[in-house]
Image (spheres, rainbow, N blue to C red):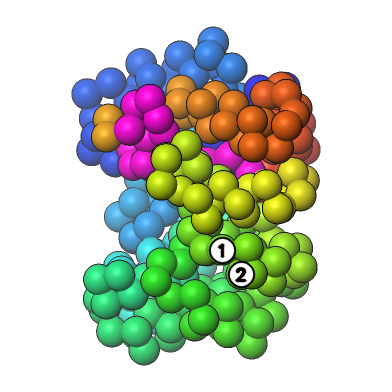
Amino acid sequence: MKIFDTHAHYNNEAFDADRDELLSGLDAHGIGTIVNVGASIQSTRETLELTKRYPFLYGAAGVHPNETGELDEHWMEWLGQAAREEKILAVGEIGLDYHWDEPAPEVQKYWFVRQLALAREVKLPVIIHSRDAAKDTLDIIKSEQAKEMGGVIHCFSYGTDLAREYLKMGFYLGIGGVVTFGNAKKLKEVVKYAPLDQLVLETDCPYLSPEPNRGKRNSSLNLPYVAEHIAQLKGISTEEVISVTSRNAQRLYHLCF
């Protein structure tokens, strides 16, 4: 079983110099499938282009909470069309991010709800981004019945109490390079606690490279480090982590191979 990277940003300018070479070589390194995730109108556009160029690469259409200031009815309509494209598997990344507090929380909440409604309309799962916004994110997911669409809490960064809430609703938790960091005690506890069949691997590349490459550009080539670390935490083999998380990702995104 090959590794499934459930959350990447290969449209990012960090890959401009060697994108094709890198992506074309992933299969030889055991990386099978990638979902490239939109975080703005422009990056969703770029994601659509990448899905046409690479058979193993799929996409998600959505606007990150800190980019929701660009949204209006015209762009929501465009996003709805993008979400209906054949290789778009999810609506995301969407959610709340109060770290920068920009745009205002009320603006973020409004467009989060609207994009959840879009996911329900197009019958796709959601990719949830939540940073420094634990309570509001959970409240909206519950009030909007987002468990009906299902999805993943990307780059999960909260504790076991919140993990329990999402796991009970059937959500997957996205685990990436942060789990390898020495100071990621809370996330390590979550990984030990959560059932393996509700975890998926992700890079969020070019960000969040795992140890031993922390601080460098991230790519799917680093996912074996993440799988190895999860295996150590759970006392199982790396091969089992890769196999189970890849099957989880197929279920998450309704993909059959």
Rendered-image quadrant of the N terminus? top right
Rendered-image quadrant of the C terminus? top right
Say which mark, if any, is on residue 162.
2
Where's residue 220, x and y in %?
A: 47, 29
Secondary-structure class at tag 2: helix
- The answer to whether the residues at label 2 and label 1 have Cβ atoms under 8 Å apart is yes
Where's residue 157, x and y in %?
A: 48, 59
Say which mark, if any, is on residue 228.
none
Secondary-structure class at tag 1: loop
* Residue at 61 percent of width and 52 percent of height: 189
Residue with the mark numbered 1? 159
* Residue at 74 percent of width and 69 percent of height: 169
Give, as a three-letter code, the residue at label 1.
Gly
- Residue 131 in sight here: yes
* Residue at 49 percent of width and 18 percent of height: 26
Badge 1: how crowded within 10 Å, few (<14), some, or many (20+)?
some
- Residue 78 in sight here: no
Give, as a three-letter code, the residue at label 2.
Leu
- The range drawn in magenta is 200-214
* Residue at 75 percent of width and 35 percent of height: 244
Which of these two is toward me, 72 or 239? 239
